[in-house]
Image (tube, rainbow, N blue to C red):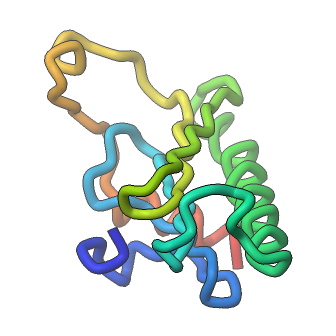
Amino acid sequence: MLTQNPKNLTIKTYNKGIILLVPYFMKRPLDALIIVADISKSYIHDLTQEELFCLGEALHDVTNAIIELMPGLGREIAYNLVFHTGEIGGMYIEVLPYTQEIGGYEHLGIYLCQGTSESTVGFYKELIQ
């Protein structure tokens, strides 16, 4: 993800250990990822104290931004955090706000997003800086 995602979709880097970004393959508006830069760290217990602090900061920033942005979209504040851990590719967290209903194509694995990665990163950067 760190090598394939365009740099302009990075929202914020926390002491070069934790990176908050919008994925180029967004399924829903306001989707975000929190990535641990050191891909050899696969679990929360692998993180240093500084990385844990930065992870907490990133979670704080993105959830506060979601709380600000969701009412403007006419939506309730609702989101999921999905922690991906394990030996393949390091640890990352998906931030998935509930911004649109699931349609028929999604059940087939094809996602139609009502927003763009560029507009989403703009919303987040305005609130997180």
- Residue 117 vs residue 77: left or right? left
| Quarter where residue 106 is shown | top left
- Residue 53 vs residue 43: left or right? right
**Which residue is painted at 27% across and 13% down in the image?**
103
Looking at this view, is 50 or 86 the one in front?
Answer: 86
Q: How many marks?
A: 0
Q: Position of residue 74 (x, y in %)?
A: 59, 28
| Quarter where residue 22 is shown | bottom left
**Which residue is painted at 66% across and 27% down in the image?**
78
Q: Position of residue 126 (x, y in %)?
A: 63, 71
Looking at this view, is 109 or 39 the one in front?
Answer: 39
Identify whether 124 is placed above or below 75: below
Looking at this view, is 69 or 19 the one in front?
Answer: 19
Q: Position of residue 89 (x, y in %)?
A: 38, 62
Q: What quarter of the picture does the C terminus occupy? A: bottom right
Identify whether 110 is placed above or below 7: above
Q: Position of residue 128 (x, y in %)?
A: 69, 71
Identify whether 36 is placed above or below 33: below
**Which residue is painted at 38% across and 38% down in the image?**
28
| Quarter where residue 13 is shown | bottom right
**Which residue is painted at 48% across and 51% down in the image?**
86
Identify whether 71 is placed above or below 26: above
Q: Residue furthest bottom?
A: 15
Q: What quarter of the picture does the N terminus occupy? A: bottom left
